Each structure stands twice: as C-alpha cells, then as structure tokens.
Image (cartoon, rainbow, N blue to C red):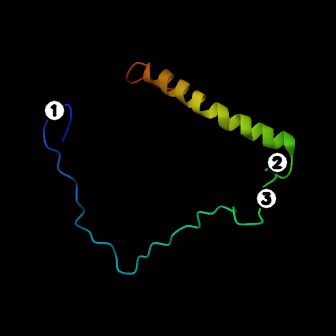
C-alpha cells in the first residue's frame, strides 16, 4: 500500500522467464577468514602509514557523502555545472 495516497500498489512482474542455461554461482563469503589466515595489524601490504590512511579515509566518507547530498539538494532545479 502506498502510504501517502492510501492506494494499493501492484507489484511489477516480468513476462520474460529466466533462461534455462543461466546459473547462479554463490560467492565465497569467507573473504580469507579461514583458520590460519591473519591479516595482521597493518592489513595493507604490512604498511602502517598506508593502513592508517585508508582507515581514516573510510571513516570520513559517510560525512563527506552526506555533505555532498545536502549541498546538491539545495541547488536550484536545472543548475548546470560550470
């Protein structure tokens, strides 16, 4: 049900069946976490500087992405890049 209008929403169905020769191959979700594998403290090429850089970068991305979304949402409709 659409919460705003109160109307019933019908699911979209596909008339095209899945091909018989198409197979789904599951991924290996262990990501190297097998017994005996130790990434170590410095997980990127055993380099503490590069590891710290990438750790810090991944911490700042969510806030930077939120800033970008807020900034672009505030632009007038039809704004062109210079």
Question: Which residue is pictured at 65% across the width and 61% down the height?
Answer: 31
Name the secondary structure under disc 3: loop
Q: Residue 37 carries which label?
A: none
Name the secondary structure under disc 2: loop
From what the image shows, is residue 34 above or below residue 69? below
Of the numbered discs 1 and 2, the one sitting upstream in the chain is: 1
Q: Which of marks 1 and 3 is in front?
A: 3
Q: Where residue 29 sits: x, y (%)?
A: 58, 63
* Residue 16 falls in image quadrant: bottom left
Q: Where residue 53 sits: x, y (%)?
A: 78, 37
In this picture, residue 57 sits left or right of residue 17: right
Q: Which residue in the structure is indicated by mark 1? A: 5
From what the image shows, is residue 63 above or below residue 32? above
Q: Is residue 64 visible?
A: yes
Q: Where residue 28 sits: x, y (%)?
A: 59, 67
Q: Which residue in the structure is indicated by mark 2? A: 41
Question: Which residue is pictured at 35% across the width and 80% down the height?
Answer: 20
* Residue 56 falls in image quadrant: top right
Query: Badge 1: how crowded within 10 Å, few (<14), some, or many (20+)?
Result: few
In this picture, residue 5 sits left or right of residue 71: left
Question: Which residue is pictured at 22% across the width and 54% down the height?
Answer: 12
Query: Badge 2: how crowded within 10 Å, few (<14), some, or many (20+)?
Result: few
Q: How far apart are marks 3 and 2 (CA)?
A: 9 Å
**Toward the viewer: 27 or 80?**
27
Q: Where residue 41 sits: x, y (%)?
A: 82, 48
In this picture, residue 52 sits left or right of residue 78: right
Name the secondary structure under disc 1: loop
Q: Which residue in the structure is indicated by mark 3? A: 38
**Toward the viewer: 75 or 35?**
35
């Amino acid at each position: 049900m659409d919460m705003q209008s109160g109307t019933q929403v019908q699911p979209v169905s596909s008339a095209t069946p899945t091909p018989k020769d198409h197979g789904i191959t599951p991924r290996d979700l262990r990501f190297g976490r097998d017994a005996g594998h130790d990434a170590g403290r410095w997980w990127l090429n055993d380099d503490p500087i590069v590891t710290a850089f990438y750790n810090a970068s991944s911490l700042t991305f969510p806030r930077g992405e939120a800033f970008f979304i807020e900034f672009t949402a505030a632009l007038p409709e039809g704004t062109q890049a210079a």
